[in-house]
Image (cartoon, rainbow, N blue to C red):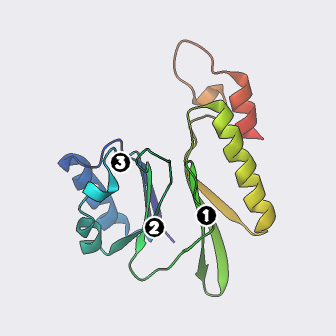
Amino acid sequence: MKVIYWNIRGIANTPSRLVLKRHILTNNPDFIFISEPWIPYNNFPFAWFNILGFKLFSQNSRGNLHPNLWCFCLNSLNPTILDIDDQQIPFSYNVNNLDLYFSAISASTSNIRRKELWSKLNLLQTNFAAPWCFIGDFNTILGAHEHSGSFLPARPPVQDFQT
């Protein structure tokens, strides 16, 4: 199984779509997750994905804000959505009578909101006792070795993510 996750920061522009198309054609993924498309999903020509053999199977729910996480899969696949919120879309997919569990993530930049996500991810693992793949933009790091800049990163968000 192959997956592409891209925090694209704007899918409406032609150069981004061309790079995405090249990645799709080169890597032949089963799933594609687009974070921060910066366009209302109703304004995007989804026929573009359909021509490439993909369908939108979910997007996150952010109340009055546009979804910032779009989930696509091959037209032949039928993942089962387990939940949807503003930071993640957990789903399962059956391969050869084996349920695989995933969560596409676009975590909040707020440490308090990310703590809510960590709790939800732990609950999912408890409710669905199977291997999980958490993929996405966690908006945090595992340690100072992943950080660039003049100031050291705050320790509590790093420790929360490590835990």
Where does the image place residue 113, in percent across and percent down from the top left? 64, 37
At x 43%, y 44%, the residue is 65
Label 3 vs label 1: CA separation? 21 Å
Decide which of tag 1 and tag 2 comes sooner along the chain. 2
Decide which of tag 3 and tag 2 comes sooner along the chain. 2
Residue 102: give its label. 1
Q: Is disc 1 in contact with disc 2, using a CB cutoff of under 8 Å?
A: yes
Label 1 vs label 2: CA separation? 11 Å
Q: Amino acid at mark 2?
A: Phe
- Secondary structure under the numbered disc 3 in the rendered image: loop
Q: Based on the displayed image, in which of its 4 quarters is residue 64 positioned?
A: top left
At x 37%, y 70%, the residue is 28
Residue that label 2 marks: 31
Q: Is residue 56 left or right of residue 155?
A: left
- Secondary structure under the numbered disc 1 in the rendered image: strand
> Looking at the image, can residue 142 be seen?
no
> Looking at the image, can residue 100 be seen?
yes
Is residue 44 depicted above or below 138 in this figure? below
Q: Is disc 3 in contact with disc 2, using a CB cutoff of under 8 Å?
A: no
Label 3 vs label 2: CA separation? 16 Å
Residue that label 3 marks: 37
Where does the image place residue 148, in percent across and percent down from the top left? 52, 22
